[in-house]
Image (cartoon, helix red, strand yellow):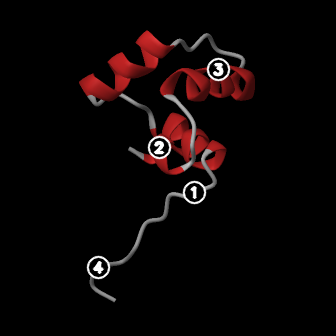
Amino acid sequence: MLTASRATTLKKLAERLSEETGEDYTYNSLLGKLNRESLSLKEAEIIASILDYKLEFVDLYK
């Protein structure tokens, strides 16, 4: 998982996500979203930013 490559945990990621968004994220709520595949695109962008990644759409026909 991406968190391991950044030496962090899902719990710490949930805490940072809460700080960034003002919403209440916990380890369990974030794990549930990941398991249900129900992250919003905005949440995915914020998580990527926290982990120093970026989401990018690539034209496969280019």
- Mark 3 nearby-residue class (10 Å; few <14, some 14–19, many ≥20): some
Q: Pointer 1 and pointer 4: residues touching (CB < 8 Å)?
A: no
- 17 is higher (above) or lower (below) than 50: above
Please name the residue that numbered disc 2 is placed on: 4
- Mark 4 nearby-residue class (10 Å; few <14, some 14–19, many ≥20): few
Mark whose residue sits in front, 2 or 1: 2
In the foreground, 7 or 23? 7
Q: Residue at x 57, y 36 (%)?
A: 8
Q: What is the CA distance from the residue labelled 4 to the residue labelled 3?
A: 35 Å
Q: What is the CA distance from the residue labelled 2 to the residue labelled 1?
A: 13 Å
Q: Secondary structure at mark 4?
A: loop
Please name the residue that numbered disc 3 is placed on: 15
Horizontally, residue 15 falls left or right of residue 11, namely: right
In the foreground, 9 or 16? 9
Please name the residue that numbered disc 1 is placed on: 53
Q: What is the CA distance from the residue labelled 3 to the residue labelled 2?
A: 16 Å
Q: Earlier in the sequence, mark 4 or mark 2?
A: 2
Q: Earlier in the sequence, mark 3 or mark 2?
A: 2
- 51 is higher (above) or lower (below) than 14: below
Tag 2: amino acid? Ala
Q: Earlier in the sequence, mark 2 or mark 1?
A: 2
Residue 12, percent from left and from top: 61, 25
The picture quadrant where one finds residue 40 is top left
